[in-house]
Amino acid sequence: MNSRLFKILLGPIAALIIFVILSRQGLSQPIAGTACVLVWMAMWWILEPVDLGVTSFLPFVFFPILGVMDASTVAMQYMEQTIFLFMGGFFIAYAMEKWNLHQRLAYKVLRNTGQKPSRVLLGVMLTTFIISMWISNTATVMMLLAAVLSIVRHEHLFDRKYHSQIACALLLGLGYTASIGGMATLVGTPTNMIFAGFYDKTFPDALPISFSRWFMFAFPFSLTLATIAYFIIRKLFIHKDADRKFDMEFIRKEQEKLGKMSTEEKRVLVVFFITVLLWFTRADIQIGDSVFRGWASYLSFGKWIKDSTIAMAAATVLFILPSGKIKTEALLEWKDVTKLPLRILLLFGSGFALAKGFEQSGLGNLLAGKLILLKDFPTWIIVLGVATLVTVLSEFASNVASIQLMLPILLPLSASMGTDPLQLMVPATLAASFGYMLPVATAANTIVYGTGYIPVKSMMRTGFLLNVCGILLLTLLMRVLHF
C-alpha cells in the first residue's frame, strides 16, 4: 500500500470508528454522523492526501446520508454571502495585477525607504503589509516575489559575506508580513471572513462583524506584530557590519520601465479606494461613547447591504469600465479571473456546512456539557490555551482548516463559561494566521521557502519566536481591549 492510499483510508476508517463508538454510547445518529464527518475532514485537512477542495465535498455528500440535514439545506451553506466578499476581493486583486499597479506601489515604497539592507527589509515588509490587507496573502506574495527576488539576485548590492542572510531576511519578511497584514481586515485572509460569516449566521440579532469593527481591533494588533517581526528578523539576519548603503539605480530603472501611471491604473485605483471607503463607512462606528452612523443606516434597505455587496458591486464596475488601450476591453475581463480559486470557495462552504451540522445535530450542545469543567479557569488562561492550540494546529493544517475545526467547538465552550463568544473566537481566528515555523504551514511560507534562499532551521527558529510573541500579544490585548 502506497503512502497516499494509506492517508486516504485513514480518514474514513477514523470516521467509522468514531461513528461506532458514539452510536454504542447511545448518541443519536445525527450527532454521531456530524462527529464522524468532522473527524474525516480533520484527517484529510491535516494529512492532505487529496486536495482541500475535495475534502470540502464531504459535508454535502454525507450529511444527508447520515440524517444530519437535507441536501438543500447543506447546499445553502456553500453559497453564504461571505463567500462573495472573498470573491470580490480576488476580482479587485486581479485588476491590480493585470495593469501592474502592484509593481508600481512596490517599487515606489522600496525607493523611499532607504539604501541599507535594514531599510530595504522595512520597505518590503511595509509594502507587503499594505497590500495584504486588501488581497489574499498568497496573491500578495506572488505579486511581490519578483520584485524582492530582483533585489536578492543583485548580489553586488550587499556584502557577499552576508548576502545569504540578507536574502533570507527579505524573503522571510515577505512571507511573514503577508500573513500578518492579512489579519488587519476582513478581506485580508479567508479565516477572517469565515469567522465573520460564522458569527453573523450564529448570532443574527447581535452587532454584526462589520469591516470597520474588525479593523478597529485587528489593525493595531497586526501592525504591532509586524513591527515585532521586523525587529526579530533584523536582529537574527542583518549583521551590523552588513547594514551598509548600496546603489538603488536598478530599482529606479525598473520603475522607469513602468512609465507614467496609465489610465487603466488610475481607474482601478479609484475603484479600489472607493470600495475601501464604502467598507469603512457602511456600518455604525463606535469610538468611546460616540457613535458615527454608517451610510447604510440612512437607507431603508441598508440592513440588507453587507460588505460582500460592496465587493461584488466593485467587481461589477471593473467588468464594465472600459480600458484606455482597447475600446472594446473592460478593466477586467472574464478571461482574467478564470484562475479564481474554487477550492477556497468550497472550503468556505464546507466550514459553514460543518457549523450548521453542529447546530442542527446537537453536537455543539453535547460538547458544551463536556467542556463545562473549564469554566472555572480565568478567561485569559483559556484565551492563551486556545491561541496556542490553534497556532500549533495551523503549523500542520491550513489556517482555513484550523479555524473551521475550532469555531464550532469554541461556541459551546463560551456558552458553558458564560462569557462573550467573541472572547474566544477572535483570538482563535487571529491565531489561525500564526503558522510561521514550517514551510507547509501557509501558502506564503511555501512560496518563499521554494526560492531556495531560506534554510528550514532559519524559518523554524524565527517562526517559533514570532509565534510566541503573537500568542502573548494576543492574550494581552484580549485582556485590556474589548472587541
Image (spheres, rainbow, N blue to C red):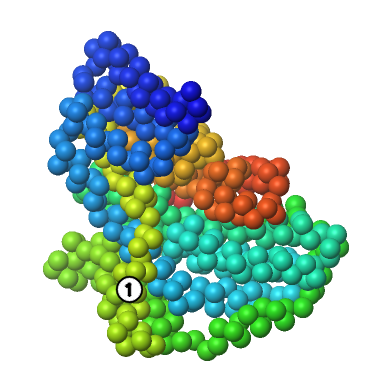
Residue shown at 14%/42% (left/top)? 72
The residue that appears at 38% across and 55% down in the rendered structure is: 341
Is residue 47 rendered to the left or right of residue 26? right
Residue 478 in view in this figure = no
**Residue 297 quadrant:** bottom left
Q: Residues within 10 Å of mark 1 (few under 14, many from 20)?
A: some
* Residue 180: percent from left, percent from top: 53, 55
252 displayed left or right of 21: right
214 above or below 254?
above
Seen in the picture, residue 404 relative to 339 is either above or below; the reply is above
x then y, percent, for residue 296:
23, 68
Q: Is residue 424 above or below residue 289?
A: above
Q: Is residue 127 above or below residue 411?
A: below
Image location of residue 189, percent across then percent down: 43, 55
Q: Position of residue 460 (x, y in %)?
A: 66, 42
Q: Which residue is mark 1?
A: 333
Residue 446, can we see it? yes
Q: As shown in the figure, which amino acid type bears the numbered disc 1? A: Glu
Question: Which secondary structure, mark 1?
Answer: loop
Total residue callouts: 1
